[in-house]
Amino acid sequence: MAHSKPPGLTLRGAVWHIDKDIFGTRICESTGTRDLKKAALILARRIEEIRASHFFGVRTPRIFREAATRFLEENQHKRSLDRDARALSAVDPYIGELQLQRVHGGTMQPYIQDRAKAGVSPGTVNRDLAVVRRILNLCARLWRDESDRPWLETAPLIQMQRHPNKRHPYPLSMEEQRLLFSELSGHLARMALFKVNTGTREHEVCGLRWEWEVRIPELETSVFVIPADHVKNGATRYVVLNRTAKAVIDACRGEHATFVFTTEGRDGRRHPQARMNNSGWKAGRRRAAARYQEELGQTCPEGFRRIRVHDLKHTFGYRLRAAGVSFEDRKTLLGHKAAHVTTHYSAADIETLIALAEKVSDLASRKSPALSIVRAGGAAQVPEIIGGKGGTRTLDPGIMSAVL
């Protein structure tokens, strides 16, 4: 005699799924079996778990998908929400219907192995695992059920994947900077020079707006105050200008009503630059690498061949350190989130920060033993025009003195 199907079981494809509401708690998950008898036993066990929670205060069992849904609902303000949603979408087929206590390093292995076979980098996998770890920590430490118990007794240890080919930061020497910037088109060279003198992130440079410029009359200069919702770490970002960065800003005045850094489009009008890591950057990088041996007298390092836009931020940080700027002040100038960073600076504070940033310009105008530690190599002869395919543009003397 065939086993009768209890209410709450639905056959989807070849697997029985549970969809049932018990005491206000909805169970919606796969049984993982095509055997009706086994599926009925699994359903009965889940009903008993919900009943025990309801009457005796036992922890309510939940599946990972329920936790992931709550995480997304509670973090609508996150700038990285889309990235988190993609990560959860990727892991859902593997752990979405598992009870929280069954999500751990072992049950994550099929996902990790499949992603590796698909050629996904360990770094990308680690970002996905980090979202899973965050959710499990919230289940164990913050979220409570109706009986005031945490959703999960303890959060398991999920180890990150080793990244044997991880790309390490590559701070540029002054000679390498001159070589690279000489192969960038005018607008990219401006942005790169600004970035290497301010430590700003790529999206901060591309999205920099004139409305964020704040004049400081007593110092005869200005700073840019980037609102928190335009900054990666969610904290208001003060961008102080040394003489090189100020020369770049002054060269951009009047070109666009809203954005500082723009490029001329095919329509003859200027438009904001969406990103720096584009075909122009990569082409300039290739040309600079091809000239490296001849200009600097040594084999081109792999780090230079693959130089990233973000390495300009690392370069600024390295030069601050080489100039003797303290760790706390470096964090402030680089826009890193720290307890000592405030949301308001006085003119005296700004003057101090500008003086510290000015040390990077000073390093560019003299031979620094500290900077020579980065990599050996002679100085390169750089043309007086910064350009590349698509046209060249002569920069004003204030900017050229910093490049050359």
Image (spheres, rainbow, N blue to C red):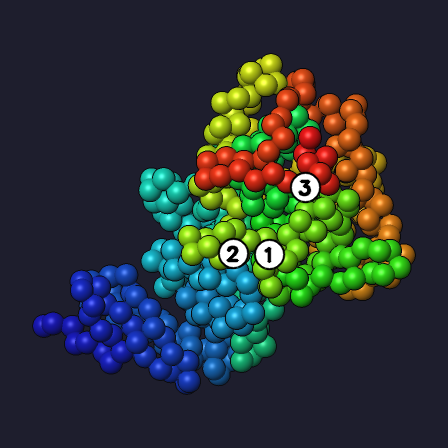
The residue shown at (49%, 22%) is 290
Bin the neighbour count of mark 3 within 10 Å (Cα to Cα): few under 14, some 14-19, many 20 and up: few
Looking at the image, the residue that sits furthest to the bottom is 23
Mark 1–mark 2 CB contact (< 8 Å): yes
Mark 1–mark 3 CB contact (< 8 Å): no
Looking at the image, the residue that sits furthest to the left is 1
Which residue type does callout 2 highlight? Arg
Bin the neighbour count of mark 1 within 10 Å (Cα to Cα): few under 14, some 14-19, many 20 and up: some
Camera sees residue 168: no
Assign a secondary structure to mark 3.
loop
Residue 155 falls in which quadrant of the image?
Answer: bottom right
Residue 89 image label: none
Q: CA distance from mark 1 to mark 3?
A: 15 Å
Mark 3–mark 2 CB contact (< 8 Å): no
The residue shown at (77%, 44%) is 243
Residue 270 image label: 2
Disc nearer the start of the sequence (1/3): 1
In the rendered view, would you say 258 is above or below 186? below
> Mark 1 highlights which residue?
255
Disc nearer the start of the sequence (3/2): 2
Residue 20 falls in which quadrant of the image?
Answer: bottom left
Residue 396 image label: 3
